[in-house]
Image (cartoon, rainbow, N blue to C red):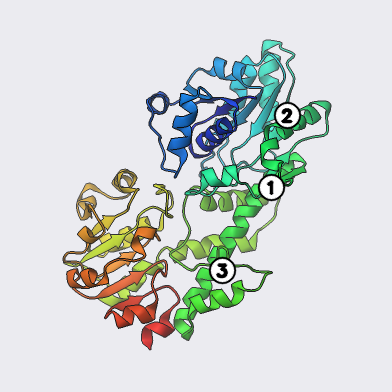
Amino acid sequence: MKITIIGTGYVGLVTGACLAELGNDVFCLDVDQKKIDLLNSGGIPIHEPGLEEVVARNRAAGRIQFSTDVAASVAHGEVQFIAVGTPPDEDGSADLQYVLAAARNIGKHMTGFKVIVDKSTVPVGTADRVTAALKEELATRGAAASFSVVSNPEFLKEGAAVEDFMRPDRIVIGHDNSPEGEKAAAKMKKLYAPFNRNHERTFWMDVRSAEFTKYAANAMLATRISFMNELANLADHVGADIEAVRHGIGSDPRIGHSFLYAGAGYGGSCFPKDVQALERTARQYSQDLLILRAVEAVNDKQKLVLGRKVLARFGADLSGKHFAVWGLAFKPNTDDMREAPSRELLRQLIDAGATVAVYDPVAMAEAKRVLALDLTPEELARVRFADSPMDTLTGAEALIIVTEWKAFRSPDFDRIKAALAHAVIFDGRNLFEPEAMAEAGFEYHGIGRSILTRT
């Protein structure tokens, strides 16, 4: 099938590359000429394991192309995926200007039937606004082309997006029951047929339910994270081990093990934005989502917990003290620094007068860009970007781990202890076992693991 992807960001590029991998003829559109030039030269604007190889393979086979030509993109695809950004607005609602601009561009150029797919994460009711924008453009032109707007939200995890797309646990498609809607559903069924050969993975529903499903899923996962973080903070006070608790409750099949890891808080482009957007939608209907408000408040507080542990151990005035920080991206296998807990930690340390040396296996370039926005030039000068994990340690009072990269799981503890001024580790992701750390001669501070730290 001929497919157009509007937007070559995280969702759009993964979607386009994977659909091309299945043999479709994919046209990827973006208004950013620099990004298109990078893609056409063989580069990739984001870090996502496996994506560069998929894009390269399909570029060589002629199944994927990148362009800024709007008219050509509309002419190309019988199915038009809108996969542009929906950043949070000032009031927390999703900013739909890019989605509606994409819809208007389609309306300006379409001549025959098109399936318009909302792939971006959008609030309930967005399909109606996209439909109105398309009709307005068609009316302005006096054109009679028909279309149907479908909701097909993405469920991709950063760091595993290619695998998630190629082996989905579910495909959600919302459409209406009009003749155009049924025609669109038939095209979507054909497009996703390769994923349903072993068993049916597609869940068909109305458009608004499909839009709601994406927000509900992310809100539920964010809730699990904040709930476990709140329990971990209590565990620190009552003398329990949150890891033992996690195993105990996760064995209950009604609960399961996923998203029960205590840590330094969630970040990224999805959970913070989507929780806020769902809250905003609720307020528009005079509903108050009390649980989600608490989820967001707990997460904001959790991002400060690691820094507070450092201040409690070394004092409120960290002037003249130096710290090593491992991990900057909000999660492993990505360079995404959006809402990353490391940014809050660095702000706490800098405000207290400390200097820091930081390292991340992938996110160093993005971290330099983001921290230049977070910090003044004088503050940024107190941050050293190291060449390796061990390079951060010399002269540091303690090691602070923020992101659970695999490369950090089995370090040379003898070298760490020899390099640090004090054998102290603050583990924001509970990578290590407190008993093993005690045997190795470390003072160990995890999240919710105080019972083993004291004994």
Can you see residue 192? yes
Q: Residue at x 26, y 68 (%)?
A: 412
Can you see residue 284? no
Q: Position of residue 372 (x, y in %)?
A: 29, 45
Q: Quadrant of the N terminus?
A: top right
Q: Pick out the residue farthest to the bottom.
A: 455
For numbered disc 2, what is the local secondary structure? helix
Q: Position of residue 341 (x, y in %)?
A: 40, 58
Image disc number at residue 187: 2
Quarter holding residue 407: bottom left
Residue at the disc numbered 1: 212
Rate crowding at label 2 as few (under 14), some (14 to 19) or many (20 or more) other CA atoms within 10 Å.
some
**First in sequence: mark 3 or mark 1?**
1
Q: Position of residue 143 (x, y in %)?
A: 71, 12
Q: Is residue 222 above or below residue 80?
A: below
**First in sequence: mark 3 or mark 2?**
2
For numbered disc 3, what is the local secondary structure? helix
Q: Quadrant of the C terminus?
A: bottom left
Q: Residue at x 49, y 62 (%)?
A: 299
Rate crowding at label 3 as few (under 14), some (14 to 19) or many (20 or more) other CA atoms within 10 Å.
some
Q: Is residue 424 above or below residue 97?
A: below
Q: Amino acid at mark 1?
A: Phe
Q: Residue at x 71, y 41 (%)?
A: 197
